[in-house]
Image: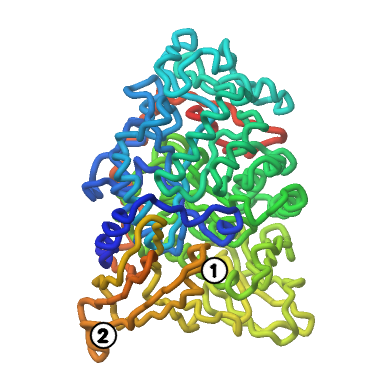
Amino acid sequence: MHFSSTTTILAALGLALGPLQTLAATADQWRSRSIYQVLTDRYARTDGSTTATCNTADVDYCGGSFQGIESHLDYIQGMGFDAVWISPITAQIEGDTPYGYAYHGYWQKDLYSINSHFGTADDLKSLSQAMHLRGMYLMVDIVVNHNGWNGAPDTVDYSSFTPFNEKSQYHTPYCAIDYSDLSNTTNIEQCWIGDQNVPLPDLRTEDTDVRTTYQTWISGLISQYGIDGLRLDTVIQVEKGFWSGFGAAAGVYMIGEANADGAEYVCNYQNYIPGVMNYAQYFPLVDAFSSTSGSISNLANMINSVKSECNDMSLVGSFSENHDQPRFASLTGDMALARNIMTYTMLADGIPIIYQGQEQHYNALGGSTDPYNREALWFSDYNTDANLYELATTLNKARKQAIADDPSYLSYNAIPSYTDEHVLAVRKGKMTFVTSNLGADGADTTVTVDNTGYAAGTSVTDLLTCDTLTTASDGSISVTLSSGQPRAFYPSGSLGSSGLCGSSDSARDVTSTTLATSTSTTVSDTTLTTTSAADTTVNTTVSATTLSTALGTTSTSITLAPSSTSASASDPTSDSTSTTTVISTSTIFTTTTVRPTSTASSSNNNKHNDKNNNNNNKKPKYFLPRPRPRIANKPKYQAVKFRA
């Protein structure tokens, strides 16, 4: 696996500029982003190994690190993702427990220390800076509901926790949460997650001292590490009044895990935090596409229910896998169904979130959910030729083009425009995407999709196949689904410079914009040279207005020198292209090429299966199910979670 060179020299300079700066402080700046979820311990190792042992059934640290993530940002950015959600970064309880090690990050012990298994504080700062140099946002998972303890509840040594080291700061005595009745908020918010073996002492988030300590902590954490957004663990277990002061102190977008059925229950949390993970949609979504007999109508109904209950659909998290839920490929190996659910996930309302390994069709070998769904991504060799990696890349381009072309796209709530037993068509702005659970072996099926918003005789392009259709006199389109594949239509004349289906691509090789600011240091005119693999000369001009918009701040005196190249335009096979950029005032800007090349074969998609094949017959004696909150019947595959 080879990637073109990155911005190491720029990152080093950026770190020298002083305090880290966040790139985003508002929910509005997050709407257009797409998020790649990383399990820090399982994404990439500092040593770059793609063969290091990581048996999920062992429930132990595998060596993933902040440095590993930084060295593999090309892989994420190459798919078009411009935000990364990483695991909780705080220090955890150490040693083995009846349920394994705290590699996931949800059994914290010390708020003020970094989990040394992931690296150092400087490593995290370097990762943050490297992401900002690329114009990417850093989202950190945090836990405020509880700490972790290895032992019976009556043996908890509260003095061992930092900073909440007094018993009076916790709900005592221990009681177990009863998720069968979500209306009992006292039980949900004051009893403990965990059990008699590994209890998670529940903090009194309703108390002033706990609140103010958390507010001071999160404000400092955001500032120290340049964090742009927060994913909030176990939101429903935290007293609701806690979030307003905490959010004000954080000053960045927050999205919470309200893991329960039902649109009304989940969306209610948007009254307290800007965003929620769309668990209301998740359950009917997976049910609809995990088999050829799934209920399309239930999914269509939930689309309407969620948008009627949630305050702002553009801020919900659209997902179909995560570290708590089953790998989709463990429910069905049908690649057509996997492509359909990914297409829906990324083009539906909200901020798309793809969990590491989903793009490699990982199938949680040995099980379905935690801990088996937390595989090491390095076993895939970071294969950029994987079917779903390429699909995610195209879908990110499609969504970004729709956002750039149509100012109302993000606020346009999706409309189910066609449904039958197997097919669901959805209109979102100028986009009409058609998904199905016909499966790879399904017969060709033709449907007529109305309510597209297209005028008669409009040429529309399927962005997944590049086929074109012409709308009928009523604006409808006749769509044929072959081999159960999804379709995503957009007006052919509105593809702009997206690079999709033969359209021009003004940034074909430039997927990285370097953005970093310092309020304390002025950089005099400096020339930096970055070298990267490319097939043609890249000349890039970016205005101060564009840079200002990207930064979300006002930029002044931005000077960009014309690019120069050591590769002849007449020799596109030249090994490298050098781009020289002048840096002026307090803003650093550069562009680097990050187009990856790969010699990995498509067989690498399931390489992790061979390396984890000893999981098949090993059942985890340490895994304790924790019943999921519910207010309605759940699909039979619904996962349970103990860890947090």
Furthest residue to the top?
154
Marks 1 and 2, the one that precedes in the sequence:
1
Query: From the viewer's perspective, is residue 164 above or below residue 322?
Result: above
Disc 2, SS:
loop
Judge from the rendering whether residue 406 lies leftward or rightward of residue 474; answer left or right. Answer: left
Q: Is residue 341 visible?
A: no
Query: From the viewer's perspective, is residue 614 above or below residue 297?
Result: above
Q: Residue at x 30, y 38 (%)?
A: 62
**Crowding near pointer 1: few (<14 within 10 Å), some, many (20+)?**
some
Mark 2: which amino acid?
Pro
Mark 1: which amino acid?
Lys
Q: Quadrant of residue 439?
A: bottom right
Which residue is labeled 2 in the image? 572
Q: Give the colour scheme of this rendering.
A: rainbow
Q: Residue at x 34, y 56 (%)?
A: 130
Give residue 378's position: percent from left, percent from top. Answer: 30, 49
Q: Residue at x 41, y 74 (%)?
A: 558
Query: From the viewer's perspective, is residue 568 above or below residue 202?
Result: below
Q: Quadrant of residue 471?
A: bottom right
Which residue is labeled 1 in the image? 400
Give residue 104's position: percent from left, percent from top. Answer: 41, 35
Quarter containing the N terminus: bottom left
Judge from the rendering whether residue 299 lies leftward or rightward of residue 617; answer left or right. Answer: right
Judge from the rendering whether residue 618 lies leftward or rightward of residue 317; answer left or right. Answer: left
Which is more toward the observer, 298 or 482? 298
Disc 1, SS:
helix
Which is more toward the observer, 10 or 74? 10
